[in-house]
Image: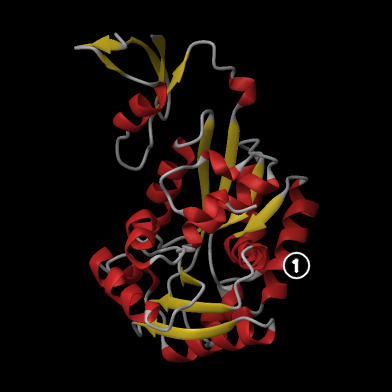
């Protein structure tokens, strides 16, 4: 097979013998095999039309180090799909005026305008602030992004809420790194829309950068604990947790869907762009929900 490798700045031709030692190499496995850290290189076979590409624009908290590599890897599961990021300053998750002010629409919209320069097909806010600010904050943000850029918009939280409705989920377990007061605000907002948080665990951390330092094994332990309440789904409600890649193993062990918010952001972005999220495989049941 002959094709191109696209890097951050340029591309080079490559050729691959797809029948080496009687083993077939598919384009998708090749693409996954050449991931290099944050950049997320991918292979595109000759004949794959770049006019059919799907560019996901992702709004990212400045101190988040988990969602970019996870989102890039998720995007690579879809032929012709790539993820592009724009940051705005977020360093603390708390209910103080200064912490809440980090999510002022003006800052978010400025970051969205930069994504529009890349001619992305959709702009998604990959953050969970609507959980404590109220879901209407994300609805307003989506409208303002579309008004400002002319590009469809979505958010991780609105996508999660849509998935809850599609799955008929009324009993939800909540796992976060947040402090108790932030956690309670999230619980109250879901209670107000008819979703009961039947079990929750939180780690009492407020420094956004430090959320990504929580080990996946610790997250699995917390998920096992909340699973005892027999929820209809578990959500890891923070896009700076390394939880998305745990979905297949957690679901196999516990028999409960994992709705991680990095994954819900990608699911919602693909839907908003008119693409089928079911193209993403190996990242949990949610991508097949419709």
Up the image or down, 107 lies above or below 16; here it is below
Name which residue lies at 38% across and 36% down.
Answer: 40
Give the labeled residue for mark 1.
Answer: 140
Where's residue 213, x and y in %? 27, 67
Camera-nearest residue between 132 and 63: 132
Where's residue 156, x and y in %? 57, 61
Up the image or down, 166 lies above or below 12; here it is below
37 relative position to 168: left or right: left
Q: Among all residues in the image, which is located at the extreme right? A: 147
Q: How many marks?
A: 1
Up the image or down, 8 lies above or below 133; here it is above
Mark 1 Cα-neighbour bin, 10 Å: few <14, some 14–19, many ≥20 = few
Where's residue 61, x and y in %? 48, 62
Residue 59 appears in the picture as rendered: no
Where's residue 264, x and y in %? 54, 58
Residue 68 appears in the picture as rendered: yes
**Disc 1 on helix, strand or loop?**
helix
- The image quadrant where one finds the N terminus is top left
Camera-nearest residue between 61 and 202: 202
- Quarter of the image holding residue 130? bottom right
52 relative position to 62: left or right: right
Name which residue lies at 49% across and 54% down.
Answer: 285
């Amino acid at each position: 097979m002959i094709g191109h490798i696209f890097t951050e700045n340029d591309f080079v031709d490559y050729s691959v013998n797809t029948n080496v030692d009687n083993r077939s190499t598919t384009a998708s496995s090749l693409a996954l095999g050449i991931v290099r850290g944050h950049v997320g290189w991918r292979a595109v076979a000759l004949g794959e039309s770049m006019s059919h590409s799907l560019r996901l624009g992702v709004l990212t908290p400045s101190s988040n180090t988990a969602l970019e590599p996870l989102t890039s890897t998720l995007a690579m599961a879809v032929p012709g799909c790539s993820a592009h990021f724009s940051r705005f300053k977020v360093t603390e998750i708390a209910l103080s005026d200064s912490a809440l002010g980090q999510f002022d629409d003006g800052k978010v919209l400025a970051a969205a305008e930069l994504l529009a320069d890349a001619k992305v097909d959709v702009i998604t806010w990959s953050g969970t602030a609507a959980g404590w600010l109220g879901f209407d904050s994300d609805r307003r943000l989506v409208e303002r992004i579309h008004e400002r850029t002319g590009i469809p918009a979505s958010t991780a939280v609105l996508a999660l809420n849509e998935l809850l409705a599609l799955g008929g989920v009324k009993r939800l377990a909540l796992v976060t790194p947040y402090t108790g007061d932030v956690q309670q605000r999230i619980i109250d907002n879901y209670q107000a829309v008819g979703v009961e948080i039947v079990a929750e665990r939180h780690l009492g951390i407020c420094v956004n950068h430090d959320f990504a330092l929580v080990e996946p094994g610790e997250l699995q332990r917390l998920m096992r604990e909340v699973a005892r309440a027999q929820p209809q789904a578990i959500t890891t409600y923070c896009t700076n947790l390394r939880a998305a890649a745990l979905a297949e193993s957690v679901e196999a062990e516990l028999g409960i869907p994992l709705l991680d918010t990095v994954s819900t952001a990608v699911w919602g972005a693909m839907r908003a762009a008119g693409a089928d999220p079911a193209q993403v495989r190996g990242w949990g049941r949610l991508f097949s929900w419709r």
